[in-house]
Image (spheres, helix red, strand yellow):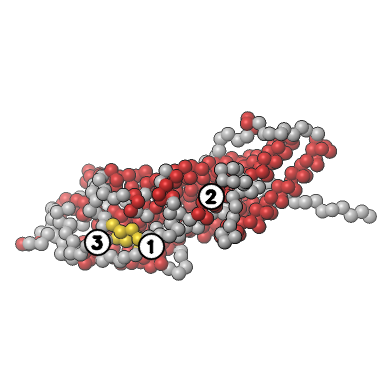
C-alpha cells in the first residue's frame, strides 16, 4: 500500500473574498451647535401651519443629532432621521426664498458641523439654510455607506452593493446638481470653509469610490457561491474596480486642500485595493485562459499577477504598499500572505502540468492584445432627487398681521409654481 500526499485545493481561497471586499469605514458628520427654528422665526412664524413645521423641524434636527452621536452608530437610523429632517429644512429654505422681505429672524441662525470623512475634523460654521440642507444630504449618503459597511461585515454582499450604489447616487446629486447650483447662484462661500464631503470636487470623487465599493461587493457575491465562478466575468469586474479607484484619486487630487484633510491610512488602503484588484484581474484572467486550454499564456498571466502582490520598492512603482505597525490595515496582512501562498501553489501546479503534459511555450511577457482592454462597470449610481416643497406663510408684524403673500399664491401646487420654486432653490447666500 502506498500513501500519496493530499492534492492541494486549487480553488480561490477565502482570503481572496475577504481582501476583495475590504473597504474603509467612514464616520458621519457631527452637529456642534443646536438650532431652534421656533425661536428664530417667533415673530413671523405665528401662522399655525408655519409654527407646526418650525417645531417639527427643530425636533427632527435634534433626533438626527442624537443618531449621529449614538455610542453605537446605525447607518440605517442616521439615514432615516436625515430623510425625515430634509423636507423640513428644505421647506424653510423655500419659504425664505420666495418671501425674503418677510423672512425676519428673532434670533440668528448659525449652523455648525464637523466632517465625517476628515482625519481631524474642525468646526465649520455658516448661516445659510442651504449649508444645513447640504450637510443633511451628506448624512444620508454617509448613512447609506455605513449601512453598506455593516452589511459587508455580516457577509450580506448583495445588500452592501445596493447601499453603496445608493450612497454614490446621493453624492452624484450633490456634485452634479445641488452644489453647483448653490455656487452658480452667487453663494458667498469658499470650498475651503466647508467640510470635505460638502464640496463639488470631493463629492464627485466619492461617487467613484462608492461605485468601486459596490462592485467589490458584487465580486464577493460571485466568489461566495459554490462551484467554479465565471473567471472571465470576475477579471472584468476587478479591472472595473481598479479603474474606479484610479478615477477617485484623479478627481480628489484636483481638490488637494481637501485631500490633505483625509487619513493617510485611507490612502494606503486605496493603493492596496488598486494593486489587489489589478492582481485579481490578472489572476482570474489567467484562470479563464487555463480553462480554455491556453496553458502557456495562463502561466505568464499568473506570473505577472503574482508580481503585483509583492511589496513595492518605492512610491510610484506597482506592488503592495508598506503597512505600518500601528495601522489598522495590519489585519489584512494574514490574508495577503495566504493569497500570495495560493498564487504560488497554483503557479507551481500549472508549471508542473505544462512541463509534463502540455509542453506549451510560456511567453516572457503577456502581449498587450491578450490583456483586458475594457473594464466592466457593473455598478451604477442609484438615482436620487429631492422632492419639491411648498412655501410656508410668514406673517409680517403690523395691523391685521396679514400673511406676506396671498394665500392662493402660497398654496398653489401647479407645475408653473413648482418650476419657479425649483429655480429659486439655491439662489443667494443668506439662506
Which of discs 2 and 1 lies nearer the camera? The answer is 2
Q: Residue at x 56, y 59 (%)?
A: 327
The location of residue 230, given as percent across then percent down, is: 64, 43
Q: CA distance from mark 3 to mark 2?
A: 39 Å
Nearer-the-camera pick, 362 or 384? 362
Q: Residue at x 27, y 53 (%)?
A: 389
Vertical position of residue 155 compared to residue 184: above or below: below
The location of residue 172, given as percent across then percent down, is: 40, 46
Report which quarter residue 393 is drawn in.
Answer: bottom left
Secondary structure at numbered mark 1: strand
**Pointer 2 residue:** 270
Secondary structure at numbered mark 3: loop
Vertical position of residue 183 compared to residue 105: above or below: above
**Tags 2 and 1 in contact by the CB under 8 Å rule?**
no
How packed mark 2 is, by other alpha carbons closer than 10 Å (few <14, some 14-19, many 20 or more), is: many
**Pointer 1 residue:** 30
Q: Is residue 383 visible?
A: no
How packed mark 3 is, by other alpha carbons closer than 10 Å (few <14, some 14-19, many 20 or more), is: some
- Quarter in which the N terminus is drawn: bottom right
Amino acid at each position: 500500500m502506498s500513501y500519496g500526499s493530499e492534492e492541494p485545493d486549487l480553488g480561490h481561497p477565502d482570503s481572496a473574498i475577504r481582501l476583495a471586499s475590504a473597504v474603509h469605514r467612514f464616520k458621519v458628520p457631527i452637529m456642534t451647535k443646536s438650532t431652534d427654528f421656533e425661536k428664530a422665526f417667533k415673530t413671523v412664524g405665528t401662522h399655525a401651519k408655519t409654527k407646526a413645521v418650525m417645531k417639527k423641524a427643530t425636533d427632527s434636527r435634534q433626533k438626527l443629532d442624537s443618531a449621529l452621536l449614538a455610542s453605537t452608530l446605525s447607518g440605517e437610523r442616521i439615514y432615516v432621521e436625515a430623510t425625515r429632517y430634509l423636507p423640513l429644512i428644505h421647506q424653510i429654505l423655500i419659504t425664505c426664498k420666495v418671501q425674503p422681505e418677510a423672512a425676519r429672524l428673532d434670533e440668528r441662525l448659525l449652523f455648525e458641523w464637523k466632517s465625517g470623512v476628515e482625519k481631524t475634523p474642525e468646526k465649520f460654521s455658516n448661516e445659510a439654510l442651504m449649508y444645513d440642507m447640504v450637510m443633511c444630504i451628506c448624512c444620508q449618503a454617509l448613512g447609506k455607506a455605513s449601512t453598506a459597511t455593516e452589511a459587508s461585515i455580516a457577509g450580506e454582499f448583495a445588500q452592501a452593493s445596493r447601499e453603496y450604489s445608493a450612497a454614490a447616487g446621493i453624492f452624484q446629486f450633490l456634485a452634479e446638481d445641488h452644489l453647483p447650483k448653490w455656487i452658480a447662484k452667487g453663494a458667498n462661500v469658499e470650498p475651503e470653509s466647508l467640510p470635505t464631503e460638502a464640496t463639488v470636487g470631493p463629492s464627485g470623487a466619492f461617487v467613484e469610490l462608492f461605485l468601486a465599493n459596490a462592485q467589490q461587493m458584487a465580486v464577493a457575491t460571485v466568489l461566495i457561491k459554490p462551484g467554479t465562478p465565471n473567471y472571465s466575468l470576475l477579471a472584468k469586474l476587478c479591472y472595473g474596480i481598479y479603474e474606479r479607484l484610479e478615477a477617485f484619486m484623479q478627481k480628489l487630487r484636483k481638490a488637494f486642500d481637501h485631500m490633505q484633510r483625509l487619513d493617510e491610512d485611507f490612502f494606503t488602503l486605496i493603493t492596496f485595493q488598486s494593486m489587489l484588484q489589478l492582481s485579481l484581474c490578472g489572476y482570474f484572467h489567467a484562470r479563464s485562459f487555463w480553462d480554455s486550454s491556453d496553458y502557456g499564456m495562463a502561466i505568464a498571466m499568473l506570473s505577472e499577477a503574482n508580481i503585483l502582490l509583492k511589496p513595492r520598492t518605492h512610491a510610484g512603482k506597482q506592488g503592495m504598499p508598506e503597512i505600518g505597525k500601528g495601522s489598522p490595515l495590519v489585519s489584512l496582512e494574514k490574508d495577503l500572505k495566504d493569497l500570495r501562498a495560493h498564487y504560488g501553489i497554483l503557479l507551481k501546479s500549472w508549471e508542473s502540468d505544462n512541463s509534463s503534459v502540455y509542453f506549451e511555450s510560456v511567453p516572457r511577457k503577456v502581449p498587450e492584445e491578450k490583456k483586458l482592454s475594457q473594464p466592466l462597470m457593473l455598478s451604477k449610481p442609484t438615482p436620487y432627487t429631492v422632492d419639491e416643497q411648498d412655501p410656508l406663510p410668514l406673517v409680517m408684524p403690523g395691523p391685521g398681521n396679514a400673511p406676506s403673500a396671498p394665500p392662493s399664491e402660497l398654496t398653489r401646487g401647479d407645475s408653473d409654481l413648482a418650476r419657479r420654486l425649483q429655480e429659486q432653490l439655491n439662489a443667494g447666500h443668506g439662506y
